[in-house]
Amino acid sequence: MSVQGINPRNGQPVGEPIAETSAAEVDAICTRAQAAFAVWSRTSREERAVVLEKIAAALDASTDELVEIADAETALGQPRLSGEIKRTSNQLRLFVSVLREGSYVEATLDSADPGIVPPRPELRRMLQPLGPVAVFSASNFPFAFSTAGGDTASALAAGCSVIVKAHSAQPGLARATAQVVARALADAGAPAGVFDIVYGTAAGSSLVQHPAIKAAGFTGSTQGGRVLFDLAQARAEPIPFYGELGSINPTVILPGAAADRGAEIAQGYAQSLTLGVGQFCTNPGLTFVPKTLAMELADAVAKTAGGAMLTARIRDAYVSGTQSLAAHAAHIANGLANENAYGVQPQLFAVDISTFAQDMEKYTEECFGPAGLIVTYDDVDRVLALLGRLPGSLTAGVHAAASDQAAAAKAADALRRIAGRVIYNGWPTGVAVAWGMQHGGPWPATTNPLHTSVGATAIRRWLAPVTFQSWPDALLPPELQEGNPHQIPRRWDGVLGAQ
Amino acid sequence: MSVQGINPRNGQPVGEPIAETSAAEVDAICTRAQAAFAVWSRTSREERAVVLEKIAAALDASTDELVEIADAETALGQPRLSGEIKRTSNQLRLFVSVLREGSYVEATLDSADPGIVPPRPELRRMLQPLGPVAVFSASNFPFAFSTAGGDTASALAAGCSVIVKAHSAQPGLARATAQVVARALADAGAPAGVFDIVYGTAAGSSLVQHPAIKAAGFTGSTQGGRVLFDLAQARAEPIPFYGELGSINPTVILPGAAADRGAEIAQGYAQSLTLGVGQFCTNPGLTFVPKTLAMELADAVAKTAGGAMLTARIRDAYVSGTQSLAAHAAHIANGLANENAYGVQPQLFAVDISTFAQDMEKYTEECFGPAGLIVTYDDVDRVLALLGRLPGSLTAGVHAAASDQAAAAKAADALRRIAGRVIYNGWPTGVAVAWGMQHGGPWPATTNPLHTSVGATAIRRWLAPVTFQSWPDALLPPELQEGNPHQIPRRWDGVLGAQ
């Protein structure tokens, strides 16, 4: 059995097939990752920062080579793909900052107090790496959520070894990227086995069930994520499984905004909906629109271009998803047709809010790709009343004018409970890599609403706390020693920032 | 069906039976908790701090009444039980400090930067309450890990509503404590339904599967915890389930310490092993001891008193657990017999390290109660070589003298990977309530090694992040507003502590 990349433009094979990784090979790779963890988990934050910088530089230096392979396997085009490599290397650089700043270990020191109930010995707590981590690549971000993407970067930064399960549609790119990462790691002196890659669905199942694996990250479909989540939870030792799954990203166009700048909103919507052939987990799938603005959105979508989707399977799911929407909503616009092998055209559907409210479940399943559903309304209070009942999403947003502030406040109050990121006067596509980013949300947006897969705190997923009680200073990790030799921010007797 | 407390001293019923909560009642209680969450989650940190202070004061004021019921249902005795109430009210007070200090919301503000890849809009991130929470009471801490215990305190502090599943052996105490808590909440003006209690195993299963419940905390047996964990993960919407399960708490007596202060160590060990009839999750179940010290430990245990265990079931499990140990290890000491209905005597078993190492699984299952297994050794390197292979525990420790520092360092390096708290020259029983406490660990100590059920960061279990993107200042929560009106510690553009 092997995996084979296919060019979405012409349906022809790209490169050679790559053999699927056997269960025995997965076992050997996991054993090596466990041995590497023993070494890597003991490196200093600064040592790992230097290694991550080298991986980032190696990715940048390999841009031309990798983009060529990526474009053949994804049809996403050179500008998008080279931008995405830069995003990916900058993601590594964010974790370099996180490692050097040091507060992510949450160093917490308590003096002894024998007089309180219960008595308190000297306690010193910090976060430490969990163990070898499995990372399941997404197809729609061949760099940023793939072999060298955010899960890999944050887990390596944490001090965990990483085994990537390559996306089966991009085996050539996965292998080429893995070679760049592995070479940079070896050049930097990281232990052999700290990073590896496996191919094939069966290898992914073996990986998430292997006793050496202590956590897993996943970006992909709700169905695929649920299967792996269930395997991870059914283990003799269940492990944290961080899956980023489906999201409809509800957006509310408030009446004042629609009146003030309807044309601009229609343009922005059409652009966000069709960017990258709509293949973003933050695609604006569900939008509440005043009735008066509906046709303007339809006109804007009608002018958009389609494109090749990533795989035949994704294209087929888009076709059946849009057919299902057409059965329950009015089909009000088609974008331009596309002649690529896996080409699709953008589509827009509309339903009035009464019909929507009667049977929300029919309308709130993600249709991955450049298809939007608009829910038209006259009375904004009807929209506000149902926002809290929408399924969990990665993002939600409102477009508001000065006259909409009261409604915007109510919308924010509801949307913050169902989405990880709530946006004001913006579109959901585009996920910044920052300290304050939250890329997560309630089920089915993710399998665990406590975490994010983008931004500085993504590292928290691969860390567990340990408290040292009454240890001699010389035997403590430097982060917890009396003199704070690395000068990191700490909490001492409850006061944050005290050294 | 009903639940009935039994006096462990005489096997006789205590108080009246309490009816089990029906599935329909559980549903109604969950619906009320959901409505209460909408109100409680919007209260300010200061409002919740004031409410928690009132619950703490109400518990203190009810000490005599509650201790009397608790003693009848648990036989733990007045001194221990009144100390435990104080611990429980102090736990609430720790969360009052956590709420007022405010850094637990992890307020993180990023300025916009359109020039980087990818471009960054203005982002403001904080943690917010997850939703209604289920709390499963433990029997061995009738106050501190029960109706008004750490899970309840931390979840209420977070802004979640709480439904407690009463331990079936302590229905009278659970009801009396719930009345104290409910009265204090009502007096303080908290919304009706923010706290409630259910009775019976079936009610617990209904609770953890109810769609309104968004997370669950549990302290108890590995078997019972696993059943509930599996129910929580099998839901259409899986939820975080924080179970604190079994733990053997390995301790290593290093050679120098044994030579320097063998008698003191033997005393300390016997006391920790038999405290509270050994009914602590941090009981020192497995201890590595130089051969020369083994008989001293046996002599110390022989002088200890037994007592009544909490329930017939726990007593029966202790009897079968000690029989299983006796089949594989030498039975080297009995403590004093105990005439209570559920009375047991302490027991000590020994096995040499070669036998132990050949078949570790036989010797590393928790035997809840005052039974210890000592593993005797001549060569400390053999001990150090196998510590990393022990199952996950809440605690682990070493006793060391000046001559043992190199071995202590190696032991710490291994033990920090398998235990949540690593202790130097101390015994594991006694869990301080502090900012720096970690009460957790790898499976089977807990179902999720990222979290703690004791200490300030226990609140993190009930919180999820949300990021506000580009919102007008007036529509942001105060924690994220430009001027930082509550003056809490925040991170701004990556710098912690900046206002």
Image (tube, coloured by chain):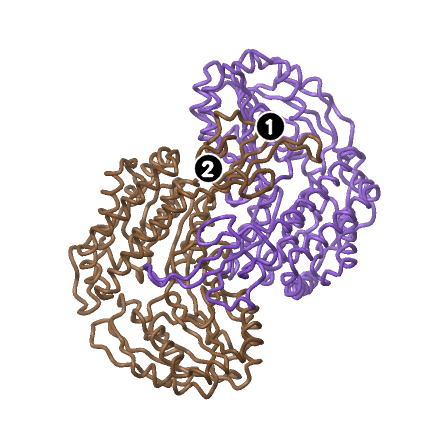
Chain colours: A brown, B purple
For residue B235, side relative to residue A303 (left or right): right
Q: Amino acid at mark 1?
A: Pro
Against A270, residue B457 (above or below) is: above
Residue B140 sits in quarter: top right
Q: Secondary structure at mark 2?
A: loop
Residue B143 sits in quarter: top right
Please report contact status of discs 1 and 2: CB closer than 8 Å, yes or no.
Answer: no
**What x and y, as percent, mark residue A204?**
34, 51
Nearest the eye: A149 or A312: A149
Same chain, labels 1 and 2: no
Residue under numbered circle 2: A487
Q: Closer to the observer: label 1 or label 2?
A: 2
Nearest the eye: B116 or A220: B116
The chain to which mark 2 is attached is A
Q: Would residue B394 be seen by someone viewing this image from the given angle?
A: yes
The chain to which mark 1 is attached is B
**What x and y, as percent, mark residue A224?**
38, 59
Label 1 vs label 2: CA separation? Answer: 36 Å
Q: Would residue B461 be seen by someone viewing this image from the given angle?
A: no
Q: Amino acid at mark 2?
A: Gln
Nearest the eye: B49 or B146: B49
Residue under numbered circle 1: B284
For label 1, the crowd category at 10 Å Cα-Cα, with few meaning under 14, some 14 to 19 and many 20 or more, is many
Residue shown at the point (66%, 50%) measured from the top left? B152
**What x and y, as percent, mark residue B46?**
67, 55
For residue B92, side relative to residue A40 (left or right): right
